[in-house]
C-alpha cells in the first residue's frame, strides 16, 4: 500500500470538447506512490477522460497535472514512461508473445541481452513462461490480456494505467484476473490507476476508489469507507445494492415514512425536520425476524414477495406496503440453521439497525 507520498497531482484540471460542457470539472486529485487507485463511474462520468489526460492522449482545457512535483501537462505520452493496458489488448498480431512484450524495450533501445532477461521476468510475473514463441492469435482472451500486462510492466514504469482491461473476459476469468492483478500489484509496489464501471471489480482490487459522476469526484475513499459510509445519494446508489425508503426527516436522526412509521438513522446531510429524504440500507444489514421480536425500534412489518437462490445466500424481496419500494434482504444459508427458508407470501418483520441506515437529501 502507498506510503502517502504523492506521485501524481491533478490541480484544477478541467476538460471540455465543445467549449461549453465540462466533461471533467475542476478536478483536484492526489494519487499516492504505490497505491491501487480505481476510477469508478457510469459511462460519460469523466473517468476515462481523466485517465487519458494522465496518459497524455488528451490535454486538459485548464489546470495542471504534476508527476513527482513537476508539471507534465505538455509532455507527450511516450516521454511519460507509463505502462498502459487497454480493454482490446492492442497486441501486434504478426509478432510473437516475446516480441510483443519486448516492444517497449526495443523502442527504448535496450540491448538484446538485457531485453531477453527482462521479457522472461515479465512473462514469469504473469505466469506465461514458455509461451514467448506463440502468436497472439493462438492464445485465449485471458492469456492475451496477460501479454498486454507483461508488456506494460516490462520496462518497469512507475505508473501503470489500465482502461477496463478485464471488460472482454467472461465472469469467472475476470474474477480470477482481479485476484491475480491485486497480487501482482502487492508484489511490485508499482502505482496502478485503473478505470472501471464495475463496482465489484473496484471494491475487490483497490486501495482507494474515486467515484465519478457528471465530471466530478463524488467520493474518494478506501473501499470499506466507500461501501459502509457513502458520502451522498449517488455513491450509495451506485456502489453496492441498497434498499431505498422515501419519507421526510423526523427529529434529528429519523425518517418518517408515508404511513407515519419512523425509522432512526444517520442524517448525513444534516437535514432539518420535514425535509424530503431517503434512507439507504445494505441488504446484508437488514435483519429478518420470522416471529415478532421483543424490540420494536426500527422495525417494519413486511411480506416476502420473492425468494432468489444465490448459492451461498438467499435474496428475499419483501413488500413493505405503503407504496414503498421493496426491501432486499440478504440471508446467508447458515442463518437458516436447519429451518425451511422463508416462502413467498410469508409475513415477516424487518429490522433496520439505525447505525447502518443512512439518510440523504431526496
Image: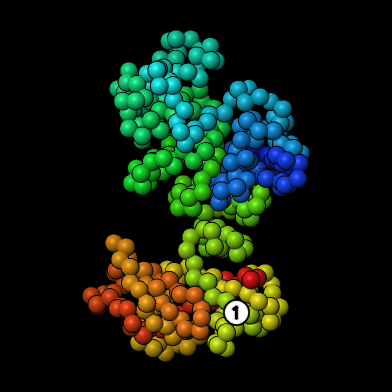
- Front residue of 121/244: it is 244
Whether residue 251 can be seen here: yes
Q: Label 1: how many residues lie within 10 Å, few (<14), some (14-19) or many (20+)?
A: many
Residue 191 falls in image quadrant: top right
Residue lying at 33% horizontally and 83% vertically, measured from the top left: 346
Please provide percent x and percent y for residue 120: 38, 21
Q: How many marks?
A: 1
Q: Nearer the viewer, residue 184 or 29?
A: 29
Q: Quadrant of the C terminus?
A: bottom right
Task: Give the color scheme: rainbow, by chain, secondary structure or one colour.
Answer: rainbow
Q: Which residue corresponds to mark 1?
A: 247
Name the residue located 65 percent from the left edge and 70 percent from the top edge. Answer: 361
Residue 183 visible here:
no
User: Is 353 situated above or below 309?
Assistant: below
180 sits to left or right of 189: left
Percent x, y of residue 136: 36, 25
Residue 265 lies, in percent from the top left, at: 57, 76
Q: Is residue 7 above or below residue 342?
A: above
Q: Quadrant of residue 8?
A: top right
Residue at left offset 47%, top offset 18%? 103
Residue 105 in the image: above or below residue 290: above
Q: Which residue occupies 33% across, 46% down?
A: 172
Q: Quadrant of residue 117?
A: top left
Amino acid at each position: 500500500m502507498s506510503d502517502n507520498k504523492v506521485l501524481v497531482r491533478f490541480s484544477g484540471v478541467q476538460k471540455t470538447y465543445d467549449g461549453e460542457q465540462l466533461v471533467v470539472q475542476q478536478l483536484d486529485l492526489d494519487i499516492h506512490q504505490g497505491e491501487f487507485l480505481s476510477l469508478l463511474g457510469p459511462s460519460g462520468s469523466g473517468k476515462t477522460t481523466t485517465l487519458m489526460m494522465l496518459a497524455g492522449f488528451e490535454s486538459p482545457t485548464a489546470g495542471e497535472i504534476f508527476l513527482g512535483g513537476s508539471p507534465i501537462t505538455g509532455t507527450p505520452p511516450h516521454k511519460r514512461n507509463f505502462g498502459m493496458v487497454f480493454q482490446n489488448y492492442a497486441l501486434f498480431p504478426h509478432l510473437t508473445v516475446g516480441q510483443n512484450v519486448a516492444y517497449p524495450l526495443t523502442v527504448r533501445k535496450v540491448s538484446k541481452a538485457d531485453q531477453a532477461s527482462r521479457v522472461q521476468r515479465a512473462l514469469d510475473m504473469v505466469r506465461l513462461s514458455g509461451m514467448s514463441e506463440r502468436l497472439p492469435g493462438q492464445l485465449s482472451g485471458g492469456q492475451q490480456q496477460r501479454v498486454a500486462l507483461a508488456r506494460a510492466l516490462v520496462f518497469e514504469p512507475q505508473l501503470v494505467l489500465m482502461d477496463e482491461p478485464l471488460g472482454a473476459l467472461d465472469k469467472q476469468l475476470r474474477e480470477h484476473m482481479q485476484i491475480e492483478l491485486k497480487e501482482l500489484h502487492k508484489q511490485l509496489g508499482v502505482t496502478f490507476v485503473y478505470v472501471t464501471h464495475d463496482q465489484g471489480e473496484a471494491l475487490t482490487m483497490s486501495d482507494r476508489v474515486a467515484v465519478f459522476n457528471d465530471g466530478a469526484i463524488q467520493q474518494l475513499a478506501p473501499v470499506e469507507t466507500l461501501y459502509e459510509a457513502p458520502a451522498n445519494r449517488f455513491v450509495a446508489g451506485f456502489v453496492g445494492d441498497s434498499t431505498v425508503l422515501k419519507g421526510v426527516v423526523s427529529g434529528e436522526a429519523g425518517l418518517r415514512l408515508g404511513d407515519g412509521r419512523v425509522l432512526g438513522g444517520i442524517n448525513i446531510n444534516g437535514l432539518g425536520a420535514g425535509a424530503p429524504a431517503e434512507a439507504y440500507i445494505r441488504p446484508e444489514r437488514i435483519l429478518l425476524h420470522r416471529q415478532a421480536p421483543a424490540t420494536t425500534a426500527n422495525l417494519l412489518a413486511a411480506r416476502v414477495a420473492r425468494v432468489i437462490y444465490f448459492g451461498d445466500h438467499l435474496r428475499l424481496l419483501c413488500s413493505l406496503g405503503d407504496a414503498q419500494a421493496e426491501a432486499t434482504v440478504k440471508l446467508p444459508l447458515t442463518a437458516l440453521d436447519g429451518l425451511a427458508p422463508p416462502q413467498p407470501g410469508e409475513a415477516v418483520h424487518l429490522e433496520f439497525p439505525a447505525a447502518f441506515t443512512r439518510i440523504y437529501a431526496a
